[in-house]
Amino acid sequence: MRKNRLTTLAASAAVVTLLAAGCSGGTESSGDDGTPAAESSGGAVGTETLTVGMPNGTQTENQSPFATGSAALSLGYAFVIYEPLMMLNDARPSEEPTPWLADSIEWSEDYTEAVITPHEGITWSDGEAFDAEDIAFSIQLRKDFEGINTSALPIKKVDTDGSTVTVTFDSPQFVNQAKLADMLIVPEHLWADVEDPTTYTNTDPVGTGPYTLDSWTPQAATLVARDDYWGGDLAVPELRYSSYNDNNALTTALTTGEAQWGWTFIADYENVYIAQDPDHYHQYAAAGLGIDALFLNLEEKPFDDLAFRQALNMAIDRQSITDVATSGVNPPITSVTGLPLPAGEEFVSDEYAGQEYSVDVEGAKQLLTDAGYTGVGDKLMDPDGDPVTFELTNPAGWNDYLTALDLIKNAAAELGAEATVQPANADGWFADIIPPGNFDATLHWTDGGATPWDLYSNIMDGAQYKPLGEPATWNFGRYQDEDVTEALATYAATTDDAERSEALGTIQQHFVEDVPAIAVWARPATAQYSSLNYVGWPSEEDPYNQPQPTGSQAAQILLNLEPASD
């Protein structure tokens, strides 16, 4: 077994030291009695409820940590009820992870086997002991029910000897080490009797995390801190997760202090938000390798035609889109490889080094004319004589996305294509539009990760292809190319740097030439938060993790908070 970048950082008591509840972000600390900080008692406890806001509209009661779009995942409180094996730092993806429910994950030389050692002394919120069987069960559950294996890990076998768990995979998992580490764990003693975890709504959730669900309505969920949490004392006694109807409503809540933590696009955020209380209002954008891209339905008109995809890609003004739609917070994608710079600089193939997107409407028109289109620039007709029309859709209230779609619509109009923007219900978008491919074009994010594999796999991986109508985990546009699928598999499996570089070159060539999706802007993990009542938030100065409340890092952030002294 090799101990690589997602293996143990420490073991046993040292693990808890790294959790560092109540200390400054990401640093080791100990209590006055010499015990690890997370095991110390007497930490400062605040009195104020922390309100977390998301612009996701009315929620349906579903507390599942597996169901895409469940209230618990949509608003983010699943991540303070359930915890991962290890805590990844998405603000610094190349950093070693912090042990959490697992003391270590040791990988075999060929990355086909991982041995997980659980941390001892952890209890579920109902008082039952957490152990290796819970980890094994949670991983086996994903093998048995493909619909909840959202990371698409090719799990072959799960074994436990009582003290460790051994997971064997069908193929090498070099690029997926983080996905195993980030896996949320559920209690076997409760979920073993669930007939179908893909539909189970889990209305009385039990987890290892620092908070438990106290009350729920379609507009808000209230959670209270555990007094027996294994990771230590919590400064915030109560969390209120409020779901606002749209970005504007959440912006108002944040600027007035009604909500103190959340993520929404705020146009001119420095004047609209921070200026309202510059001493306490903050916005932090943690950069990485993730992007937002316009996913295209490649199996239906007009995006089944390469010429039209190429033309629209040429006509879009990414700088203008990000300036208007994100107030410049999200940097436009400039590299034709789709990689965000500078984070992705080292991964750009030599063939495309220095090659950047440029707006070329006239070139796009000529490309369409050469491909047999008529009415170019007026009323565009495809080579079959059909008018070129399509619908752009994203959830209502997501103003940054919807503004971007309007600008993309205008770019299409310059070519003579008629596009319409159709806001959708957020729950429906997550469940009924994106996975089955019920769209023409839609903005969606990609994962980041420590390499570009996630970005390209999310968009192009034939291994994740599903026919239209069947739910897909990724590759929502239904791109298929055997060379790309093989190159992605090689990149993920090989331990040879030269082979990996060659595979990446193949992937980037097809991304550039085939336009499987249109890369729009880099996707830093951004959030707004108030330090009026609590301090210890991640920041540019202390990037111990990315700042959003909708991810595993939420538990780490809450452990790091302390009552404000002013």
Image (cartoon, rainbow, N blue to C red):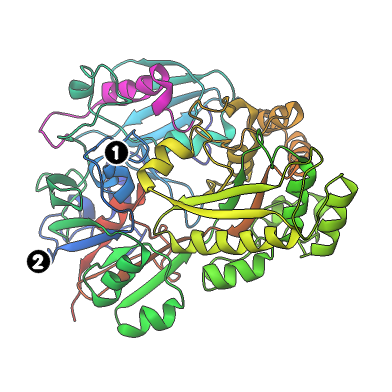
Residue at 39% across / 20% down in the picture? 145
Q: Nearer the viewer, mark 1 or mark 2?
A: 2
Residue 139 circle label: none
Tell me if residue 151 comes above or below residue 326 in the rendering. above
User: Left of 172 or right of it: where is 566?
Assistant: left
Circle nearer the N terminus (1, 2): 1
Q: Position of residue 488 (x, y in %)?
A: 67, 33
Decide if residue 289 is in sight here: no
**Residue under pointer 1:** 12
Secondary structure of residue under mark 2: loop
Name the residue beneath numbered marker 2. Answer: 47
> Dividing the picture into quarters, in which one does residue 371 lie?
top right
Q: Describe the element under mark 1 as helix, strand or loop.
A: loop
Q: Is 284 positioned to the left or the right of 406 in the image?
A: left
Residue 243 in view of the camera: yes
Quadrant for the C terminus in the image: bottom left
Residue at left 56%, top 62%?
A: 406
Residue at position x 62%, y 57% in the image: 520
The span picked out in magenta is 122-151
Along the line of sight, which residue is nearer the eye, 302 or 397?
302
* Residue 124 image offset from top left, x and y in percent: 17, 34
Q: In the rendered view, does 116 fall on the left or right side of 108?
A: left
Q: Amino acid at mark 1?
A: Ser
**Kind of residue indicated by mark 2:** Thr
- The reply to whether the magenta stretch includes residue 144 is yes
Residues at marks 1 and 2 touching, judged by CB atoms closer than 8 Å? no
